[in-house]
Amino acid sequence: MKWILLALVLGYGIGCDKSTTMMGTVGGMCSGMSTGCTGSEYCLTMMSGGYCTADCPTSGTTAGCPEGAICDTVSNIADGGTGTAIMCIKSCTQQSDCRADAGQTCNGVSGGSGKGCRPT
């Protein structure tokens, strides 16, 4: 089951496009077709306005995430919107750090004391 979720998060069936690049950062807007994300980031196009993210190994840490991002377990991402995935999200200290246009919320991350802009 874990491998199925990983495959979905990596772009098999959930609207991700890793083939494009843009001057974006984790949590930033992207569209997959005309713009993408930087470095090893990829675009979750099923999110409102898109959501640049990257793979990471351990929720609650910054390991595997670019600067300004934290690893978290995010619900309603995989399995057609009903499963969970571990991915980099934008770090935040207050709600105004997050994208209001996408309905992101600044909340604590699983397994750590940091906060991140959770995609909805």
Image: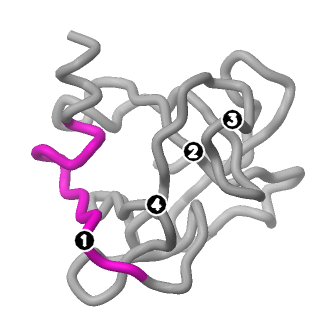
Q: Residue under circle 1?
A: 19
Magenta stretch encompasses residue 15: yes
Q: Is residue 76 left or right of residue 86?
A: left
Q: Earlier along the polypeptide chain: callout 3 or callout 2? A: 3
Q: Is residue 41 left or right of residue 92?
A: left
Residue found 60% across the figure and 48% down from its top: 89
Residue 72 lies, with reference to residue 24, above or below; the image says above
Q: Earlier along the polypeptide chain: callout 4 or callout 2? A: 4
Q: Residue under circle 2?
A: 88
Q: Earlier along the polypeptide chain: callout 4 or callout 3? A: 4
Q: CA distance from mark 4 to mark 2?
A: 9 Å
> Principal SS element in the magenta part?
loop
Residue found 20% across the figure and 36% down from its top: 8
Q: CA distance from mark 2 to mark 1?
A: 18 Å
Q: Name the element at disc 4.
A: loop
Q: Earlier along the polypeptide chain: callout 2 or callout 1? A: 1
Quadrant of residue 67 within the rendered picture: bottom right
Q: Residue under circle 4?
A: 41
Q: Tell me the amino acid under the disc marked 4.
A: Glu
Q: Name the element at disc 1.
A: loop
Q: Tell me the amino acid under the disc marked 3.
A: Ala
Q: CA distance from mark 4 to mark 3?
A: 14 Å
Range of residues picked out in magenta:
8-21
